[in-house]
Image (tube, rainbow, N blue to C red):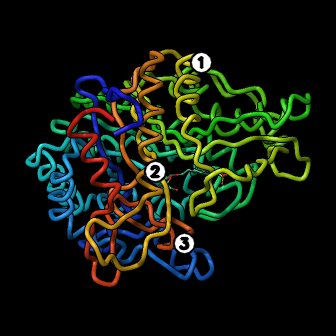
Amino acid sequence: MNAHADPLRFPPGFVWGAATAAYQVEGSPLADGAGPSIWHRFSHTPGRVRDGDTGDVACDHYRRYPEDIALMRSLGLQSYRFSIAWSRVLPEGRGRINQAGLDHYARVVDALLEAGIAPNITLYHWDLPAALDDRGGWLNPDIADWFADYATLMFRTLGDRVPLWSTLNEPWVVADGGYMHGVLAPGHRSAFEAAIAAHHLLLAHGRGVQAFRASGARGQIGLVVNLEPKYPASHSPADLAATLRAEAYMNRQYLDPVLRGTHAEELAEVFGEAWPAPRPAEQMAVIREPIDWLGVNYYTRSVVRADESAWPQRASAVPQRGALHTETAWEVYPRGLTDTLTWVKNRYGNLPIYITENGSAFFDPPSAEVDPLPDPLRTQTLHKHLAAVHAAIGAGVDVRGYYAWSLLDNLEWAHGYSKRFGLLHVDYATQRRTRKASALAYAAVIAANAL
Ligand code: GBH
C-alpha cells in the first residue's frame, strides 16, 4: 500500500503485465531449424559480452514456457509482452519458412490464451537474422520489404488471436547501440551508418503497420520507444541547446517522423555531415502510417550539460550525487515517468499508451535461499513508478497498461547475466525460478487494481 490514506485506484480495465525479449530469455537459439541471429554471433564473438555470456541457455524459456506461464498466472498477470525471434520462423530472414518455429510461437500464444493472459507480441527486439546482416542488415534499403514480409507471415499465422502487436522495440537503441557506438549487435561505429539504419528502421516500421492493415488481423498495432526526459543542468544557452540536442536525438528522432511526419531540426547538428537531404514525401508518408498505440519504455532521466567532447550529441549527463542508482548506474527518478507521459500527450496528442517496460536492476544473490526473496529496493522502486503512472493518468494521459521489465532475470545484452531485472529470480545453475518480494507486491497491486 502507498503512504496515502486512500488507495491510488487505476482505471477499470487497466492492463497489468510483464515483459521479456526472445534472445534474453529463450535459450536454444538454433533449435528446431532456427537460423542464427546477429545476437548469437555477437555474443559468440570474444570480448563483446561481459564474462563471455551468451543466450545459448539463458532462462531456457523456449522449453520452460509452460512453467513460466503458470507462474505468470499465479501472480495474476493479465498480459505478457514477448518478442518473436525472426530467424526461428525465417532462418535466412526471408524466403524459406521454418514451420517448427511458427508452431512454437503458436503454442506459446495458445498456452497464454488458455491461461487467460493476453499476448502482446513485439516483432523485432534486436535479434536480426544473421543472413540478413550478411546482406547489410539495417543498412540495406531492402530491409523494409524483408520486415514487411516477415510481419505479414506473423499476422497471417497469429493475427486472429493476438490483441496487441508492436513492430520494433526501441529503434533508437538499435541504431545508437548497434551502428553509432557499436556496443550492441552488429557492433558498428559510424554516424553515417546510424543515420541510414535509423531511416530504414522507420521505413520498416511503417511498412509493418501497412502490412498489419492489409492482413486483416484483429487487434492493434503500435511502436515501442525508449524515452528519457532531458532536463537542463543550468539555464545557460549552451546547456539549454545541449538539452534540446539530447532530447531530439533520443526522444524525438523516431516519434516526430511517425506521429508528425517531420524530422527534429537538431538532428542535423547531432549527425553533422552524416545527416541526409530531406527524405522523399512518399517515404515520409509510409513512416507516418497511423498507429493504434504507443509503447513507452522508461528507466531513467538525464540532466544535461553542453560537452564538446561528447560524440555525437556534444551533450553529456551530469551525475546526480546522492540519488538512488540501480546496478546499471541509472538514476531512479520516478517523477520522470510522469513528465515523459505528459510530454508525449502535449507534443503528440493523447494517443493510447502502454508502459511496455519499466524496471530496475538491483543486486540479488545467484541462488535464492528463501521464497519470497527480499528485494526491498526493487519493490520500493516499482511502487514509486506505479504512483508516477497513476499521476500521469490523473493529469489526463491515456495510459492503458503497464508491463514490468522483466518477468525473469535474463541476459542483459552486453552486461550478460550480471544484471538482474526480474520479478522472478532465476538460478542459472539449476533454472529454478523463485519469486522476489517485488513479484508479490506487484501481484497485490494487480489484485486490487490499486496501489
Ligand atoms: C531496454 O532498453 C530493453 O528494451 C531491454 O531489452 C533491456 O533488457 C532493458 O531495457 C534493460 O536495459 O546510461 O544513464 O545514459 C533500455 C534502454 C537506453 C535505457 C539507454 C537506459 C541509458 C541511460 N536504455 N539508457 S544512461
Which quadrant of the view contains residue 430? Answer: bottom left
- Image quarter in which the C terminus is found: top left
Dot 3 falls on a residue whose secondary structure is helix
Position of residue 191 measured from the top left corner of the image (x, y, whole percent): 76, 50
Position of residue 206 measured from the top left corner of the image (x, y, whole percent): 47, 31
Looking at numbered disc 1 in the image, what kind of residue is underneath it? Arg
Query: What residue sits right under mark 1 in the picture?
Result: 347
- Compared with 139, 402 (above or below) is above
Tell me the distance, in whole angstroms, between the alpha carbons under discs 1 and 3. Answer: 37 Å
Q: Residues within 10 Å of mark 2 (few under 14, many from 20)?
A: many
Tell me the distance, in whole angstroms, between the alpha carbons under discs 2 and 3. Answer: 25 Å
Position of residue 102 measured from the top left corner of the image (x, y, whole percent): 22, 56
Tell me the distance, in whole angstroms, between the alpha carbons under discs 2 and 1. Answer: 25 Å
- Sequence-wise, the earlier of marks 2 and 1 is 1
Query: What residue sits right under mark 3 in the picture?
Result: 42
Position of residue 400 measured from the top left corner of the image (x, y, whole percent): 34, 27
Say left or right for 201 vs 241: left
Instruction: Give whichever of 216, 122 is nearer the camera.
Output: 122
Cβ–Cβ below 8 Å for labels 1 and 3?
no
Residue, far front: 5
Q: Exactly how many numbered labels are in the figure?
A: 3
Looking at numbered disc 3 in the image, what kind of residue is underneath it? Phe
Looking at numbered disc 2 in the image, what kind of residue is underneath it? Gly
- Sequence-wise, the earlier of marks 2 and 3 is 3
Q: Residues within 10 Å of mark 1 (few under 14, many from 20)?
A: few
Dot 2 falls on a residue whose secondary structure is loop
- Image quarter in which the N terminus is found: top left
Q: Is mark 2 within 8 Å of ligand 1?
A: yes
Q: Nearer the viewer, mark 1 or mark 3?
A: 1
Query: What residue sits right under mark 2 in the picture?
Result: 359
- Compared with 68, 352 (above or below) is above
Dot 1 falls on a residue whose secondary structure is helix
